[in-house]
Image: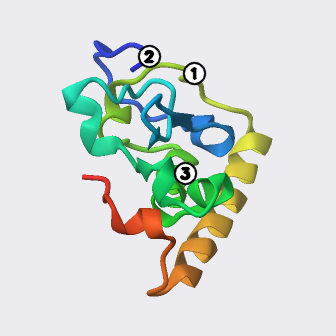
Amino acid sequence: MGNVGNAQPRQAPCERPFHTFVVSRGGDVVPCCQIFVDRPEHRPYIVGNLFDFDDIFTVFTCRTMAEWRLELVDFGPKREPCRTCSDGDFQGSPEEIDLRKRIKELITAQLAGYGRALPVGDRLRKRP
């Protein structure tokens, strides 16, 4: 992660999963460029394999990715592996904080709309 030895748990939001995800050479998908599929401690954070999704857009919009975005859109404690990451750690302007609240509402509505029918990748792995 950005600064894995960060003494203070991350509180700041992270924008990475809103515009980026990473596909490894073998097709494994992770929500951030700071998560490495070849590191054993990062294996639990693999969303799935690109070949198990219908298309690349389904990867980005799957429930697992939406859950990552929901947790990282707002200020507050983060779970591993983001808890100790200081990459892009900032406070944000009042306007940005308001915008993040609105985005969080939209993601929550998106997750509520999934119901039982999830894109195939969501059945592969759940984030610990």
Residue sitting nearer the eye, 72 or 64: 64
Residue sitting nearer the eye, 57 or 16: 57
For label 2, the residue is 2
How far apart in space, not on screen, are marks 1 and 3 (Cα)?
15 Å
Q: Please, what is the three-letter code of the amino acid marked with disc 1? A: Gly
Q: In the image, is residue 24 above or below residue 107?
A: above
| Circle 3 Cα neighbour tier, 10 Å, few/some/many (<14 / 14–19 / ≥20) | many
Q: In the image, is residue 32 above or below residue 97?
A: above
Q: Please, what is the three-letter code of the amino acid marked with disc 3? A: Arg
Q: Please, what is the three-letter code of the amino acid marked with disc 2? A: Gly
For label 1, the residue is 88
On screen, residue 83 versus residue 66, left or right, reads left
Cβ–Cβ under 8 Å for marks 1 and 3: no
Furthest residue to the right? 95
Cβ–Cβ under 8 Å for marks 3 and 2: no
* Residue at x 63%, y 37% (from the top left corner): 20
Any part of residue 67 in sight: no
User: Which quadrant, please, contains the N terminus?
Assistant: top left
Cβ–Cβ under 8 Å for marks 2 and 1: yes
